[in-house]
Image (cartoon, rainbow, N blue to C red):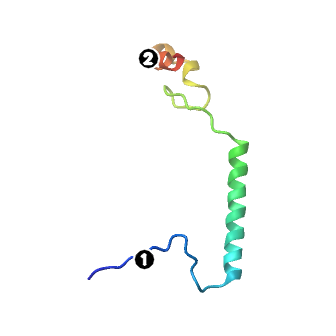
């Protein structure tokens, strides 16, 4: 038995409650605003390639002497 798929991207679905859609959109907007506020407050830091922490960049790693190939690549 074949299954037929229809393309619904970008098309408005008829039916349903506009109030329900408005509430859902409002909740999504609130979640997006909260997420954007979190990311702007805590910008992501570079992860050290040697010890995989956010405490310092790879070039400043205290273990860098044991892994000169990592530090040299970063310096270039």
- Residue at point 43%, 17% (across, down): 69
Residue 9, above or below 34: below
Q: Secondary structure at mark 1?
A: loop
Q: Mark 2 and mark 1 in contact? Answer it, CB < 8 Å.
A: no
- Residue at point 67%, 73% (across, down): 24
Q: What's the mark number on residue 69?
A: 2
Question: Along the line of sight, which residue is nearer the eye, 49 or 36?
Answer: 36
In the image, residue 32 lies at what x, y percent? 68, 58
Q: Secondary structure at mark 2?
A: helix
- Residue at point 45%, 73% (across, down): 7
In the image, residue 71 lies at what x, y percent? 50, 17
Q: What's the mark number on residue 52?
A: none
Say which residue label 1 marks: 6
Question: Which one is closest to the eye, mark 2 or mark 1?
Answer: 1
- Residue at point 58%, 25% (across, down): 57
Going by the image, does 63 lie left or right of 42?
A: left
* Residue at the outermost left position: 1
Going by the image, does 2 lie left or right of 30?
A: left
Going by the image, does 70 lie left or right of 38?
A: left
């Amino acid at each position: 038995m074949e299954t037929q798929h229809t393309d619904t991207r970008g098309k408005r679905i008829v039916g349903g409650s506009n109030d329900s859609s408005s509430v859902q959109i409002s909740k999504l907007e609130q979640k997006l605003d909260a997420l954007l506020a979190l990311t702007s407050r805590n910008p992501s830091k570079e992860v050290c390639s040697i010890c995989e922490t956010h405490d310092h960049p790879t070039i400043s790693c205290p273990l860098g002497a044991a892994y000169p190939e990592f530090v040299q690549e970063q310096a270039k």
